Amino acid sequence: MPRVLCFALFATLLASCDGGPCSGVVCADGASCNPVDGLCHCGEADGPVCDATDTCIPETLACLPEALDCGPGTRWFPGAPAFREVTADWGLAGVEGTKLTVTDIDGDGWADLEVRRGAAEVETDPSVRRTWLLRNTGMGFEDVTESSGFLTRRQPEAGGRPVDVVSWGDVDNDGDLDAFTGTPTSDLTRSGGETTEILLNDGAGHFTLTDASNPIRRPESVDAPAGGTFVDFDHDGFLDLWEPQASYSGSTGLLYLQNNRLWRGDGTGTFIDVTAEMGLLTSDWDSYDVINEARAHTQSWSSTSCDLNGDGWAELMVGSYGRAPNHLWQARVGGTGFDNRSIDSGYAFDDDMVWTGDQNARCYCQANRAATGCADVPAPLISCGDSWNPERDVQPFRLGGVSAASLCGDLDNDGDIDILTSEIRHWWAGEGADGGEILVNDGRATFTRPGNEATGIALEHGSSNWDEGHMTGAVFDFDNDGWLDIYIGGSDYAGNRGHLYRNQASSLGFTEVPVTDGIDHNRSHGIAVADFDRDGDLDVIVGHSRARCDASAPNNCYETSQVRFFENLAADGGNWVQIDLEGGEGTNRAAIGARVRVTTPDGVTQTREVDGGHGLFGAQRDHVLHFGLGASCEAEVEVRWPDASLSLVTHRVTSGHRFRIVQGEPPVLAP
């Protein structure tokens, strides 16, 4: 007779005896009382103890708690408040910035916040701060920037270390989140001789610099980091880093471009450059063909990484400034290298190569009607100069976008990862300039662009003279209905503000949430999304840019770059579950790159990946994955771990809880 059945029979007989330890004990379904201790154990005599209200899963020896406050699903509807501002209540008054990341520096389960304002510069004046590290106490944020050592300098001069880029990952697999901080070094007056660094966390939120010999510092070279994305590209269990490089100005005043870099981590915090070894080299601008085919350097502006073709090996992406092609490098199975699929994937730029809408092109054509393609071009609407080059500016590399963040998310719940791009676009550039939009994945890392009119995220501009400064954003389920919604941050130009779009639980259909219901925030730049108050829904903290303020225009700048905290009200009553992963042997401990699929009884499957950092100069989602469950009270959770064998496990969970899943162990309630 199987052991489980023998134990259950023995326990049942003993429980029936008067005065036995199990007398009167009522166990959960699937659990039995152990006559030794009188407790209900799941599956085996030494299995986990289940309360009477729990559900025992004998196959995995897991005790599932009863679904908490499970109701009919989200109660939010248009016209009801979705968010309310609680900035002062959370101790954020005086915190200013445009670059935000979510982290958990002390591992207490409360999402912490890191904020940067403007370009990196040595902090010598306490009244002009540029960086904040803020610990979430559960009742507000506590400033631990100085006490944590986060801005510790190598140079002896006083002042905090300048930081332009921040990303978080457990680089030494000791169970806490360490930091990558990127610092541009072309201008010594700003860098003060400091460099890009890796900071190791002691587990309590105190940071120390790695050895000065760490190659990632590049003290003898010009460094121009534009982002940083942790990824275990070779699945050796140690985090690596994908680092895009922006342009820099040399002593001659010329603009210089250089190769983006892939750094292999050794599990101690030391990183080695493997860019060439992994096939990621690009070239100088030697010809139009090289640039148009996305084989040349670009002025990189952001990075991200996610598995776009479902094979378990993460792709690398870079967004490019100045309309140059974006780069997509497809991973080879086994982590042996990457192939350039920028063009044929559809990620580099859209298919619209019409140049005649550009006002500068119209100026040229007005003066040169006999030139190729100019005969029927309309008259310009601007005062003309001489900035159009008829040979260069009709090339594909001049008809792309000014690409900031690329956000990975399964927006249509079809099981693959789509991309939301954010771009700067100007009216005078015409229809050939790419705007931010949804790139729909066919499951093979090839994208179609249905257009913003079709998806519902098109903007109505108040005048013919408009600019879209869309550089930051987020995809998250704000109403717990099981479908990812969209936030787009607009800033730096007159009329720009943040836009929140609700997914209509359909195939890529969105409607804008009015600012009276949602997030009313001008010049929105930088966003951090997490369940900061741990009440089961996702809150939003947004930054503010004061670039190009214009008091005569709508949505003008505020007096300062104060960040604002918007507490979620929309998901009150909505069902949810949160998953906090920890990698085991052979997996990076932060589980960056792990893919989680949550399926509810109604057949809806959501797909998420643990984020290693993304976006313009560094943004990052919470490592705790949040899933709205709609009307469901339970779900099946499938975890694909980013180890060499792509280990796959399935668990059952109930709503209203945060579960911690350590690789190789059943889910337990997170503290």
Image (cartoon, grey):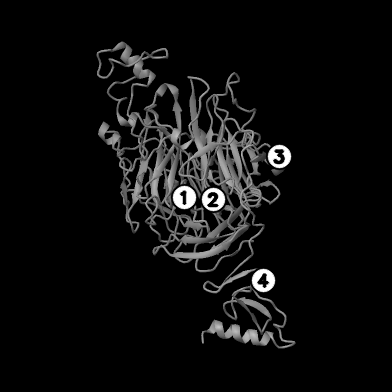
Q: Assess disc 1: are there few (<14), some (14-19) or many (≥20) residues with their C-alpha within 10 Å of its C-alpha.
A: many
- The quarter of the picture where the C terminus appears is bottom right
**Whole-Å distance between the Cαs marked 3 and 4?**
41 Å
- Residue 252 placed where, x, y %? 38, 27
Label 2 vs 3, first from the N-terminus: 3
Q: Nearer the viewer, mark 1 or mark 3?
A: 1
Q: Nearer the viewer, mark 2 or mark 3?
A: 2
Relative to residue 290, is residue 104 drawn left or right? right
- In the picture, the disc for residue 24 is none
Residue 136 in the image: above or below residue 250: below
Q: Say what secondary structure mark 4 lies in.
A: loop
- In the picture, the disc for residue 413 is 1
Label 4 vs 1, first from the N-terminus: 4
Asked whether the residues under the numbered discs 1 and 2 touch, taking CB atoms below 8 Å apart as contact, a structural biologist would say yes
Q: Which residue is mark 2?
A: 482
Callout 2, which amino acid? Gly
Seen from the viewer's position, the closer of residues 157 and 87 is 87
**Whole-Å distance between the Cαs marked 2 and 4?**
29 Å
Q: Say what secondary structure mark 3 lies in.
A: helix
Q: Which residue is mark 4?
A: 51
Seen from the viewer's position, the closer of residues 346 and 159 is 346
- Residue 620 placed where, x, y %? 52, 46
Label 1 vs 3, first from the N-terminus: 3
Residue that appears at 48% across and 41% down:
615
Callout 3, which amino acid? Ala
Q: Say what secondary structure mark 1 lies in.
A: loop
- Residue 388 placed where, x, y %? 34, 19
Q: Which residue is mark 3?
A: 88
Seen from the viewer's position, the closer of residues 552 and 38 is 38
